Image: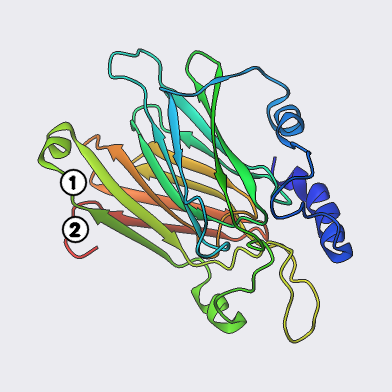
Amino acid sequence: MFRACFRLLCTAMLSVMLGTHLARADNTDGYDPWPGLVQDIFNNRPMNDGGGVIAIEMPYRAEDAAIVPVKLRTTLSPDDSRSVRTITLVIDRNPAPMAAKFELGRDANVTEISTRVRVNSYTDVHAVAELSDGKLYVVKTYVKASGGCSAPAAKNVEEAKNRLGQMRFRQFATSDQDRAKGVREAQIMIGHPNNSGLQMDQLTQLYIPAFFVDQLKLWQDDSLVLAMEGGISISEDPNLRFTYVSNGAKRFRAEARDTDGHVFRNEWDIDKPGI
């Protein structure tokens, strides 16, 4: 899906160079891109109110438009027999609005996902959950930020090359109640420039080609925990922090791919001290 969006990205890049694609900072142009995005991304499927299903948390005014934190939480009540299958994050006014699509492992009971994104203009941000009943449920928030997709990389080219594909896995302490339920919290970090295609090389004054992690899969042993299809809106050095329920596995595995065909793999002992 994201590869098919390269045509839209090229169009957006041309618009950036012409200085015409960004809406006014206060978005008073009267244009709402969401109905068109529902058609393009979700094939015009009906959208239901996501209150009680999913929540999205982002700062109203971002400190740094290139690394805006976002947290997605499932909020289904314990007695609800349905489950969340996928969550799609859409940043409406970004050049490539579909930021990421997360597939939740059927037995992993993922309830929280946090990451960092680029925001290019004052915009609505939507989170769309697809449930096991086959229906889509949507919530939104509003973020004031600009220029995130074209912001220069934080690391120089050589440093980015040396870090390319390096993975780190972190585990976090949970409450006694969560531990009793088998709930774990972990984070995966990947060294990658995640170039958006809208950033300019300060030496050559040429645009740096888009180059980003477009697939990430995480397993506990051989059971899927979480998968992500990523786009240009995911920040440099992608990271995911998430909760899941342990199935007793002793190993955690990760595999990532980028748009140049590189494949990165690693695995860790889940309970090994010092990870």
Q: Quadrant of residue 52?
A: top left
Q: Nearer the viewer, residue 202 or 101?
A: 202
Q: Secondary structure at mark 2?
A: loop
Q: Nearer the viewer, mark 2 or mark 1?
A: 1
The residue labelled by disc 2 is 272
Q: Residue 43 vs residue 102: left or right?
A: right
Q: Where is residue 238 shown, x and y percent of the image? A: 50, 59
Give the position of the C terminus as an image quadrant.
bottom left
Residue at figure coordinates x 82%, y 61% from the top left: 16
Question: Upstream in the sequence, badge 2 or badge 1?
Answer: 1
> What colour scheme has been applied to the protein in the rendered image?
rainbow
Residue count near mark 2 (Cα–Cα under 10 Å), binned few <14, some 14–19, many ≥20: few
Q: Which mark is residue 174?
A: 1
Q: How many marks do you count on the picture?
A: 2
Q: Is residue 15 left or right of residue 211?
A: right
Evaluate whether residue 133 shows in this view. Answer: yes
Tell me where residue 241 appears, x and y as whole percent. 37, 50
Q: Amino acid at mark 2?
A: Lys
Q: Residues within 10 Å of mark 1 (few under 14, many from 20)?
A: some
Q: Which mark is residue 78?
A: none
Q: Which residue is farthest bottom?
A: 203
Q: Position of residue 261 (x, y in %)?
A: 65, 58
- The residue type indicated by label 1 comes to Thr
Relative horizontal placement of residue 17, taking residue 73 as reference (left or right): right
Residue 100: x, y in percent?
58, 44
